[in-house]
Image (cartoon, helix red, strand yellow):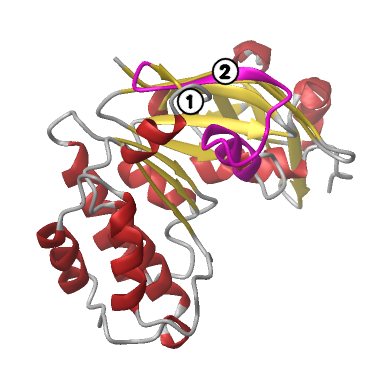
C-alpha cells in the first residue's frame, strides 16, 4: 500500500505556483523531500495536510482521499515543523494535556519515553525552550499517538549534530516494522544521505525527479575538466563554476557524451542542490 500518493497538485499564488506536483511514498520507507528555499517544499506539505486549499489535484494517504477523510486521517498522521512556535507562556505539561485529547490513540508511556530520551522537562515553559528543544517537543507529540505517516518539515533545523544523529536513529527505528512511513523535508542533505530511502526533488514549484536515493544521485554527473573541455558541454550543463584549473559542474546523465573524455563522478545530494541553486546565475 502507498503511504502517500500525491496526484497533480496545482496551487497558484501571485508570485509562485505549484505545477502538477505528483509523487508516491511506499509504506515503511523514508523519503527525503529536497529543494532550495522557496522551491515549494512547505507549500506542498501544507497542501498534503489540507492546510492550504489547492486549486486542483488529489492527495491520498494510506489509501484514502485526504479531502474526504481529513479528520480520520489526521489521527494517523504525525507532523512537526521546525521553528513552530507554541503557546509560549504555557508549561509543556499544560499544552500536552490539551493536545492529547484530540488523539484517540494517544499513549502516555510512549510520550514520557520520548521526553526522557529528548531530556525535556515538562514543567518548563515553552518560552524557555531553545529552538532545538521546541523541535524535539514537536516530535515527542507527533510520535505519541501511533501515527502511521510522519510528515516533517525541517525537523532537524536548530539541532546540534549529536541531537540530529539521535533523531535519525529514531526515524530508522520507527520504520523497521514496515508500518510507519516518513516524509522528511530538509536542506541538511547530509541527514538524508544517512537515512533516506527515496528522494523527491522540487525546483521552482515542479518535481524534477522522485526515485530511490542512489538512482537519484546516479541520474546526474559531476564533471571536472579543463577550460577547453567546458566549451564542449557548456550548453548541456545544469550549471558550472570555473576556477584556475578549469571547471566543475553538474549535468544530466542523458546529456553527457563519454567520448569527450571529461572526468566524471557521482554527485552527492548537496552537490545536486548547490548546482541547481546556481542554475541561471552568471557563471564563474
Instruction: Answer above or below: position of 273 versus 27.
Output: below
Q: Whole-percent x and y of residue 127?
A: 47, 85
Image position of 203 (left or right of 201): right
First in residue order: circle 1 vs circle 2: 2
Instruction: Answer above or below: position of 123 versus 265.
Output: below
Q: Which of 195 and 182 is in front in this view?
A: 182
Q: Is residue 62 within the magenta segment?
A: yes
Q: What element carries label 1?
A: loop
Q: Range of the magenta residues?
A: 42-63
Which residue is drawn at the image coordinates 63% and 25% (left, top)? 207
Which residue is drawn at the image coordinates 29% and 68% (left, top)? 97
Disc 2 residue crowd, few under 14, some 14–19, many 20+, Cα 10 Å: many
Q: Whole-percent x and y of residue 177?
A: 12, 32
Q: Which of 184 and 88 is in front in this view?
A: 88
Instruction: Answer above or below: position of 117 versus 252.
Output: below
Q: Is residue 124 within the magenta segment?
A: no
Which residue is drawn at the image coordinates 57% and 22% (left, top)? 209
Q: Whole-percent x and y of residue 94?
A: 33, 76
Q: Which of 260 and 14 is in front in this view?
A: 14
| Mark 1 to mark 2 CA distance (whole Å) | 8 Å
Q: Which label belongs to residue 66?
A: 1
Task: Kindly tell me whether residue 120 is visible in this rendering.
Answer: yes
Contact between marks 1 and 2 (CB within 8 A): the answer is: yes
- Give the labeled residue for mark 2: 58
Which residue is drawn at the image coordinates 64% and 17% (left, top)? 57
Quarter-of-image position of residue 253 = top right
Q: Whole-percent x and y of residue 275?
A: 68, 41
Disc 1 residue crowd, few under 14, some 14–19, many 20+, Cα 10 Å: some
Quarter-of-image position of residue 179 = top left
State how many labels appear: 2
Q: Is mark 2 on a helix, strand or loop?
A: strand
Image position of 208 (left or right of 63): right
Amino acid at each position: 500500500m502507498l503511504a502517500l500518493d500525491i496526484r497533480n497538485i496545482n496551487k497558484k499564488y501571485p508570485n509562485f505556483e505549484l505545477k502538477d506536483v505528483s509523487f508516491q511514498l511506499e509504506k515503511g520507507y523514508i523519503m527525503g523531500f529536497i529543494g532550495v528555499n522557496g522551491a515549494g517544499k512547505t507549500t506542498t506539505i501544507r497542501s498534503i495536510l489540507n492546510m492550504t486549499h489547492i486549486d486542483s489535484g488529489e492527495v491520498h494517504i494510506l489509501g484514502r482521499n485526504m479531502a474526504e477523510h481529513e479528520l480520520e486521517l489526521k489521527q494517523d498522521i504525525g507532523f512537526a515543523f521546525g521553528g513552530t512556535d507554541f503557546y509560549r507562556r504555557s508549561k509543556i505539561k499544560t499544552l500536552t494535556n490539551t493536545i492529547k485529547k484530540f488523539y484517540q490513540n494517544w499513549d502516555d508511556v510512549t510520550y514520557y519515553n520520548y521526553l526522557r530520551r529528548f531530556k525535556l522537562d515538562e514543567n518548563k515553559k515553552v518560552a524557555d525552550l531553545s529552538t532545538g528543544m521546541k523541535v524535539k517537543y514537536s516530535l515527542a507529540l507527533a510520535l505519541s499517538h501511533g501515527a502511521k505517516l510522519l510528515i516533517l518539515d525541517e525537523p532537524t533545523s536548530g539541532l546540534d549534530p549529536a541531537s540530529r544523529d539521535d533523531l535519525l536513529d529514531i526515524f530508522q527505528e520507527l520504520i523497521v516494522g514496515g508500518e510507519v512511513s516518513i516524509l522528511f523535508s530538509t536542506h541538511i542533505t547530509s541527514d538524508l544521505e544517512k537515512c533516506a530511502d527515496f528522494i523527491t526533488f522540487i525546483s521552482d514549484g515542479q518535481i524534477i525527479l522522485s526515485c530511490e536515493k542512489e538512482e537519484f544521485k546516479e541520474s546526474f554527473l559531476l564533471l571536472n575538466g579543463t577550460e577547453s573541455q567546458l566549451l564542449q558541454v557548456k550548453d548541456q550543463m545544469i550549471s558550472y563554476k570555473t576556477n584556475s584549473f578549469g571547471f566543475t559542474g553538474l549535468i544530466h546523465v542523458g546529456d553527457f557524451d563519454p567520448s569527450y573524455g571529461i572526468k566524471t563522478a557521482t554527485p552527492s545530494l548537496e552537490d545536486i542542490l548547490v548546482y541547481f541553486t546556481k542554475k541561471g546565475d552568471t557563471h564563474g
